Image (cartoon, rainbow, N blue to C red):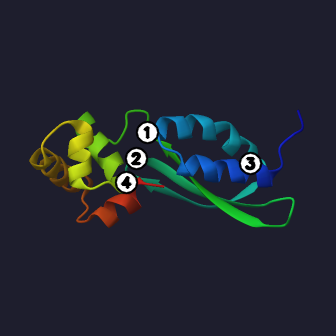
């Protein structure tokens, strides 16, 4: 089997980004990202509540510039949040509404509202946008 070019790897990563099922995307993306890292330089690193985010930039064989943001999460998850609050925070990062989160988790919308308030308080953010900037890649 021929080695994949960086252009092919980026195409596969774009397709994974559109796929459903967050766990499958992460598992499938890991080897692709590892291959991309060999051709990248670091643009920046920042600490987030969930871990560290770093932005990389590289150039493909066709001289196209690309950048990718990777997040290394703390092994214990988002510090200070309960398991339920971590799950709600991840759903918010994926752009889901309170009603969608409640339906997916099998709880009431009021329970999700309470969990969102707790997440905002514990992470010292005041909006979804601030939460996404702090937690999400």
Q: Residue at x 22, y 53 (%)?
A: 98
Label 1 near label 3: C-beta < 8 Å? no
Q: CA distance from mark 4 to mark 1?
A: 17 Å
**Which residue in the structure is indicated by mark 4?**
93
Disc nearest the viewer among 3 and 2:
3
Q: Is residue 102 left or right of residue 111?
A: right
Mark nearer the N terminus (4 vs 1): 1
Viewer-side residue, 99 vs 44: 99
Mark nearer the N terminus (3 vs 2): 3
Q: Residue at x 39, y 52 (%)?
A: 94
Viewer-side residue, 86 vs 46: 86
**Which residue in the structure is indicated by mark 2?**
50
**Which residue in the structure is indicated by mark 3?**
9
Disc nearest the viewer among 3 and 1:
3
Label 1 near label 2: C-beta < 8 Å? yes
Viewer-side residue, 81 vs 115: 115
Callout 2: few (<14), some (14-19), or many (20+) C-alpha neighbours within 10 Å?
some
Q: Residue at x 83, y 49 (%)?
A: 5
Q: CA distance from mark 2 to mark 1?
A: 6 Å
**Location of residue 21 in the rendering, given as x and y in whole percent from the top left corner:** 46, 39
Numbered disc 4: secondary structure: helix
Q: Quadrant of residue 28?
A: top right
**Which residue in the structure is indicated by mark 1?**
74
Report if residue 80 is visible in the image: no
Q: CA distance from mark 4 to mark 3?
A: 25 Å
Mark nearer the N terminus (4 vs 2): 2
């Amino acid at each position: 089997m021929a080695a994949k070019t960086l252009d092919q790897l980026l195409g596969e990563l774009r397709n994974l980004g559109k796929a459903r099922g967050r766990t499958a995307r992460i598992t499938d993306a890991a080897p692709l990202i590892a291959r991309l890292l060999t051709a990248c330089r670091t643009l920046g690193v920042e600490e987030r509540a969930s871990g560290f985010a770093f932005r990389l930039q590289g150039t493909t064989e066709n001289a196209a510039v690309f950048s990718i943001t990777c997040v290394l999460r703390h092994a214990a998850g988002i510090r200070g949040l309960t398991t339920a609050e971590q799950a709600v925070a991840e759903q918010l990062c994926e752009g889901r509404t309170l009603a969608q989160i409640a339906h997916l988790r099998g709880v009431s919308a009021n329970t999700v509202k309470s969990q969102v308030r707790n997440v905002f308080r514990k992470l010292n953010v005041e909006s979804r946008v601030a939460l996404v900037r702090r937690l999400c890649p």
